[in-house]
Amino acid sequence: MHIILDKADPVGQGKVQDTIIEIKNKLPKIDSLEMAERHYEEQATLLEKALQESICQGVKDRLLIKLMARKVSLYRGITN
């Protein structure tokens, strides 16, 4: 899959860099809950930072709504 999004407008004198996110590595072998928590936290932090610094707030807001709606539907047993 290849998607192209609009990047955010710079704030003040700042610049918004082009950002490329590649999702292609296989999940590593995870031997413990602690290892899983650490790995998922690191991955989420990298993704959040990349999105926070590159896409506009309106897209971030709607993405959050879509992710939360999907999570809620999983608890209810509803799939999208």
Image (cartoon, grey):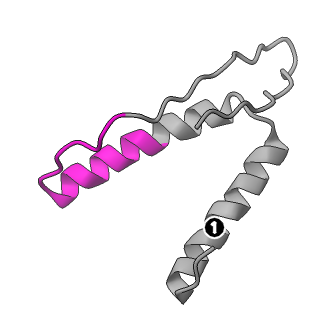
Image x and y of residue 67, in percent: 63, 62
Which stretch is magenta? 25-44
Q: As drawn, is 27 to the left or to the right of 31?
A: right
Residue found at x 57% / y 34%: 49
Residue closer to the observer: 72 or 15: 72
Q: In this rendering, would 23 be left or right of 20?
A: left
Q: Is 69 part of what is drawn in magenta?
A: no
The x, y position of residue 78, in whole percent, is: 58, 84
Image quadrant where one finds the C terminus: bottom right
In which image quadrant can residue 70 be found? bottom right
Q: Which is nearer the eye, 44 or 25?
A: 25
Q: Residue at x 16, y 46 (%)?
A: 29
Please check the rendered image and state whether residue 40 is part of the magenta-colored stretch, yes or no.
Answer: yes
Position of residue 23 relative to residue 62, above or below, is: above
For residue 48, which quarter of the picture?
top right
Tell me where residue 65 sits by quadrant: bottom right
Q: What element does badge 1 sit on?
A: helix
Judging by the rendered image, the residue that carries numbered circle 1 is: 68
Three-letter amino acid code at the position of disc 1? Met
Main secondary structure type of the part rendered in magenta: helix
